Amino acid sequence: MRALQITGGLLAGIVFWGCGGGERSSPDTYTSSPEAKQSVSASLTLIPHRWEGASDSIETWTARSGGKILQREKYENRFYSYTLRIPTTKALDFFTQVRTLGEVLNEHTSLSDITRAYNDIEARLKAKEEAVERLRALLREAHTPSEILEAEKALQIALTERDSLRSSWENNRLLSETVQVDITLRNRRFVSYQEGGSYWAQFWQSIEAGWDGFVYFTFALAYLWWLWLLIGLGSFLYWWRQRKKTQPPTAA
């Protein structure tokens, strides 16, 4: 398991080093991007040494790294599930901290090259911004109502297309500057022995499950008191009839 953690750390380090990160661009500044743009996603499932407080640690480290919690889910006392976005420049340190929480069950990192899509949207956005400025100039020069109406209609269409491209560009920028991280925290008491769970945790869990079953059984007995009363009364009547049949006749 230690070798797996070291291997996972080296892989994540190589991936995060390749992502670069860099300075955040201004939303209104679109320049050529000769460097590679990559999207990184990672998933990690682990069993915390101490279940209480493990989720608080995840949320604290996310905030300290400048990340964001996209989704949070808890299933009873069995597991926590998080979807996070962590800046690439902080991702390696974040993963190093998370691994200290407990035993890693599985870990996966994937890398996608989005350079072509990023540059394509960036070029289209720059061209659309120029088109918007030209339409605004035409609108200022328009004199007749029909010219103004036509220029306004064309400008509105161009603005809508520009805003859509801006949204796509911002999404790709976010993908290239952050890592999407899926983290699952498993309670050791509910991890099967085959998955890497503790033998004694499974042993005590079985005892608890058996005791819970016994308690529910006694509740069922108490809830159906009327049924046992009918069965008892029926048994008594049956015994009484049989006894009457077997009794010898009394002498006259």
Image (spheres, rainbow, N blue to C red):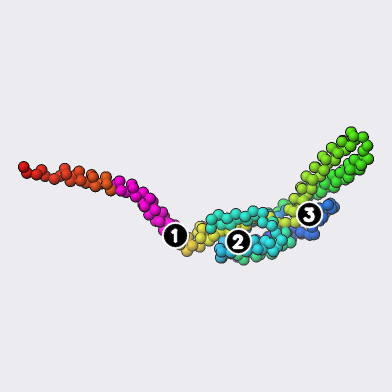
Classify residue 216 by image quadrant. Answer: bottom left
| Crowd band around label 3 with a 10 angstrom C-alpha radius: few (<14), some (14–19), many (20+) | some
Q: Which residue is mark 2?
A: 55
Q: Position of residue 154 (x, y in %)?
A: 85, 38
The image position of residue 101, as x and y in percent, is: 60, 65
- Answer yes or no: do the residues labelled 3 and 2 have beta carbons within 8 Å? no
Amino acid at the residue labelled 1? Glu
Above or below 127: residue 200: below
Q: Residue shown at 53%/58% (left/top)? A: 77
Could you say where residue 195 lies in the image, as x and y percent from the top left? Answer: 53, 57
Residue that label 1 marks: 208
Residue at x 43% of width, y 57% of height = 212
Of labels 3 and 1, earlier in sequence is 3
Label 1: few (<14), some (14–19) or many (≥20) C-alpha neighbours in 10 Å:
few
Q: Is residue 188 left or right of residue 158?
A: left
Magenta part of the protein: which range?
Answer: 208-231
Tag nearer the camera, 3 or 2: 2
Gap between marks 2 and 1, in whole Å? 25 Å
Residue 236 part of the magenta-drawn span: no
* Mark 2–mark 1 CB contact (< 8 Å): no
At label 3, the amino acid type is Ala
Residue at the top extreme of this rendering: 146
**Foreground residue among 223 and 204:** 223
- Is any atom of residue 152 visible in this view? yes
* Residue drawn at the location 58% of the way across and 57% of the way down: 80
Q: So how many labels did they put on this image?
A: 3
Residue labelled with disc 3: 36
The answer to whether residue 92 of the structure is visible from this angle is no
Q: CA distance from mark 3 to mark 2?
A: 34 Å
Q: Quadrant of the N terminus?
A: bottom right
